[in-house]
């Protein structure tokens, strides 16, 4: 896909797709790239997810709901990290801030879930405007550290000076969520045809918001506006030279990603009826970074999978007999391996596999099965040789290679 | 913490704030100097610096005392306590050496592969490493806080003129920090090694063209930075309990210290660390304890917005 400039083979494969006409590979490629199919795939995905998750992966619906909530957060975060190339270590401000805003709004203004969602998101956008305006004056690591600074500042503000609003270390407990549109009990069951797929209304509500969020992210990223984000990531100076107001686009990318964080934060409050102080701590920002990178930066669906995998390890693997106590360690190792070896994450792997399969189908059709098998064998031998070479170079690197 | 009585004079109050601020800032300074020289010379962002502090603290505890275990995998495997009980001085000598070696390995196997990759990738991989170290320690030794005993020769209060009684160990922290930071400063400013490192920071390509190999000095710089973080763990351990979270807790203020002082500037790190420490202690002691953490972050944000290159940083460093 053209979303993956870091993956040269993927771009090459797309070009090749365009040259050869007809065939399964090309029909799939043209289907895949349409907006309606993205939305349809998401709808089907969120509809069957709880059924598969609960029956085959030891899951439960509440965790599936949480996965979607963090999925929305990660999709938004990826607009900033994967598409615009800015690493924020302060997105807990928007997630936790929206969660608190939603909670306080529900307790003192209105308990309508839609209004609560709107209030939380609006607060996140407002915060992002301020924090982004201040942090984006600096690039690279300074941006990461400035966002981290504002994040920690808001954590300590909520912890004690603002404890009269936030209830300090105990977290905000007086969340009050009413019925959706005044009639539907959001924490209740679902009507008949839906019962085959899900067992509570909350999941349906979160799933609908997820589909809308993914559709929105998809629309933004495929618009000219999203193309500018990518241009900034590839070469900021060049984007500036062609006359783009880079600073304004960066600020908007920041605010858009914070809006997604705000949606997720508000849903988090609606889901749990509680806002922990921890939701503002910088480890929360770290979590979303890990989820997004694991899933695959620079892809639309990757972050959803990253969020799912993270929460799966945190909640399900942690209960395993032998692996359980090491779940966080496992997560750290998987993360580091992903950063070093698979910069495009799970989704990068899926796309790589998909492109290779398409290429293999095409190659086989053109050259026959025999040539294809011989080629595959050669390729495997090459790969193994490369790995051996890499292992043998370790002593040289250890004792006096010329570094930087 | 014990603060002054109501009858102490204003002067004594101020001096106490300054001394406590020095002590509070000392840990920040030790961490920040290491972080700063690595960032300044190697242009490498090390989010695992807090993990090195953590390793230093646990290793220091291991060498200093015999610690009973009551949680974690080691207990389940039948190990009831750990530690060799050689005393504090031994820890102060052994820990920097071990962490120095860890630093060398880290440079060769992790950092080197990331010099040519974007800052964000460096942050990501070191952040992941920090999680691995922290969670390994938590899984093995449990998440409980362990008290780190103060060395017996430095525990208890000491009577100072004007200020009155002051914890002896805090003075020790200030003294050890001063000696180490002066040592690193002298190494960088007055030796041939320091000259090469400084020249390499300014224009690495030119230095290489002159026939000087830079990979070794850079390796050593990384090691020294790591060793300082390790010492910070040993020195800071007795001030509070040791648990797996202290690394990440110290990392953020340490980074702030670096950017406030100016990247690569040892003097800057010292000034910034003392500023943050003093501000924090001042707010606590004047009755605004709730604002003490907010205060240091607000100060950091203010400095970065007004003077992005840091207090003592030069304009060239701005990226």
Image (cartoon, rainbow, N blue to C red):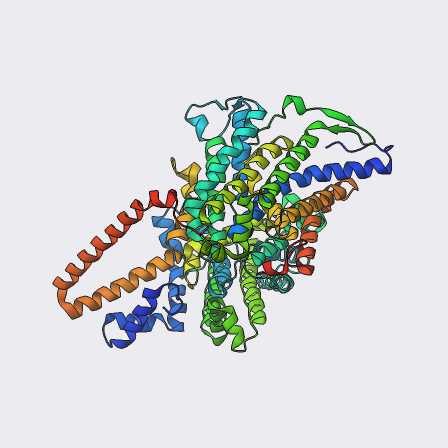
Q: Residue B319 at x, y = what percent?
A: 57, 61
User: In the orientation shown, which residue stands out farthest toward the left?
Assistant: A370
Which residue is found at the position 27% from the left and 76% from the top? A19
Looking at the image, residue A150 sits to the left or right of residue A28; the answer is: right
Looking at the image, residue A166 sits to the left or right of residue A375; the answer is: right
User: In the orientation shown, which residue stands out farthest toward the front?
Assistant: B210
Of B200 and B314, nearer the camera is: B200
Q: Quadrant of residue A5?
A: bottom left
Which residue is found at the position 31% from the left and 73% from the top? A15
Res. A202 visible in picture: no
Looking at the image, residue A84 sits to the left or right of residue A18; the answer is: right
Q: Residue A338 at x, y = what percent?
A: 40, 51
Q: Residue B204 at x, y = what percent?
A: 49, 55
- Image label count: 0
Of A328 and A317, nearer the camera is: A328
Which residue is found at the position 66% from the left and 49% from the top? B268
Of A45 and B233, nearer the camera is: B233
Res. A192 visible in picture: yes
Q: Quadrant of the N terminus of chain A?
A: bottom left
Q: Residue A246 at x, y = what percent?
A: 56, 71
């Amino acid at each position: 896909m053209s979303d993956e400039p870091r993956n040269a083979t993927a771009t090459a494969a797309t070009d090749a797709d365009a040259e050869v006409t007809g065939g399964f590979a090309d029909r799939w490629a043209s289907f895949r790239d349409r907006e309606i199919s993205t939305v349809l795939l998401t709808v089907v995905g969120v509809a069957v997810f709880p059924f598969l998750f609960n029956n085959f992966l030891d899951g439960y619906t509440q965790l599936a709901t949480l996965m979607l909530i963090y999925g929305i957060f990660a999709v938004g975060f990826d607009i900033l990290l994967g598409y615009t190339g800015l690493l924020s270590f302060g997105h807990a401000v928007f997630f936790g801030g929206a969660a608190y805003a939603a909670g306080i709004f529900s307790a003192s203004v209105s308990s309508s879930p839609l209004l609560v969602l709107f209030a939380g998101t609006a607060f996140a956008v407002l915060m992002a405007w301020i924090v982004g305006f201040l942090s984006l004056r600096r690039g690279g690591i300074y941006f990461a550290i400035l966002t981290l600074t504002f994040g920690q500042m808001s954590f300590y503000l909520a912890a004690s000076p603002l404890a009269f609003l936030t209830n300090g270390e105990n977290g905000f407990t007086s969340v009050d969520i009413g019925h959706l549109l005044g009639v539907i009990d959001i924490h209740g069951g679902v009507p008949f045809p839906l019962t085959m797929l899900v067992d509570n209304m909350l999941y349906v509500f979160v799933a609908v918001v997820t589909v809308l969020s993914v559709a929105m992210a998809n629309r933004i990223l495929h618009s000219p506006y999203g193309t500018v984000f990518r241009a900034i990531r590839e070469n900021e100076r060049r984007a500036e030279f062609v006359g783009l107001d880079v600073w304004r686009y960066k600020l908007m990318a920041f605010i858009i990603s914070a809006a997604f964080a705000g949606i997720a934060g508000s849903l988090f409050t609606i889901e749990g009826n509680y806002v922990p102080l921890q939701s503002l701590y910088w480890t929360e920002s770290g979590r979303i970074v890990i989820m997004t990178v694991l899933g695959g930066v620079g892809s639309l669906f990757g972050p959803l999978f990253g969020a799912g995998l993270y929460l799966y390890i945190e909640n399900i693997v942690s209960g395993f007999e032998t692996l359980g106590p090491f779940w966080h360690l496992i997560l750290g190792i998987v993360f580091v391996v992903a950063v070093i070896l698979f910069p495009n994450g799970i989704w990068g792997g899926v796309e790589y596999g998909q492109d290779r399969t398409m290429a293999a189908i095409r190659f086989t059709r053109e050259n026959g099965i025999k040539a294809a098998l011989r080629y595959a064998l050669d390729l495997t031998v090459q790969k193994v040789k490369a790995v051996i070479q890499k292992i043998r170079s370790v002593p040289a690197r250890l004792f006096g290679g010329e570094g930087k | 913490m014990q603060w002054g009585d109501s009858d102490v004079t204003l002067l004594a109050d101020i001096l106490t704030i300054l001394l406590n601020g020095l002590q509070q800032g000392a840990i920040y300074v030790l961490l920040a100097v290491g972080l700063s020289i690595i960032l300044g010379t190697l242009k490498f962002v090390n989010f695992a610096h807090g993990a090195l502090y953590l390793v230093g603290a646990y290793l220091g505890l291991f060498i200093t005392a015999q610690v009973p275990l009551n949680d974690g995998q080691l207990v389940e495997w039948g190990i009831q306590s750990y530690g060799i009980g050689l005393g504090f001085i031994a820890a102060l000598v052994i820990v920097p050496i071990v962490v120095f070696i860890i630093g060398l390995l880290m440079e060769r196997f992790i950092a080197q592969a990331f010099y040519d990759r974007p800052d964000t990738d460096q942050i990501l991989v070191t952040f992941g490493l920090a999680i691995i170290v922290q969670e390994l320690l938590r899984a093995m030794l449990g998440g409980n806080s362990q008290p780190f005993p103060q060395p017996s020769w430095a525990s208890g209060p000491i009577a100072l003129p004007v200020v009155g009684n002051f914890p002896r160990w805090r003075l020790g922290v200030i003294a050890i920090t001063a000696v180490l930071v002066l040592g690193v400063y002298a190494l960088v400013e007055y030796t041939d090694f320091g000259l090469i490192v400084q020249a390499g920071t300014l224009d690495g390509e030119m230095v290489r063209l002159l026939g000087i190999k830079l990979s070794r000095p850079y390796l050593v710089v990384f090691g020294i930075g790591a060793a300082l973080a390790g010492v910070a763990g040993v020195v800071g351990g007795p001030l509070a309990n040791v648990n797996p979270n202290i690394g990440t807790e110290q990392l953020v203020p340490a980074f702030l210290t670096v950017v406030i002082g100016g990247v690569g500037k040892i003097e800057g790190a010292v000034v910034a660390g003392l500023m943050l420490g003093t501000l924090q202690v001042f707010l606590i002691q004047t009755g605004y304890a709730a604002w003490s953490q907010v205060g240091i972050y607000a100060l950091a944000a203010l400095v970065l917005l007004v003077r992005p290159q840091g207090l003592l940083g030069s304009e060239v460093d701005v990226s």
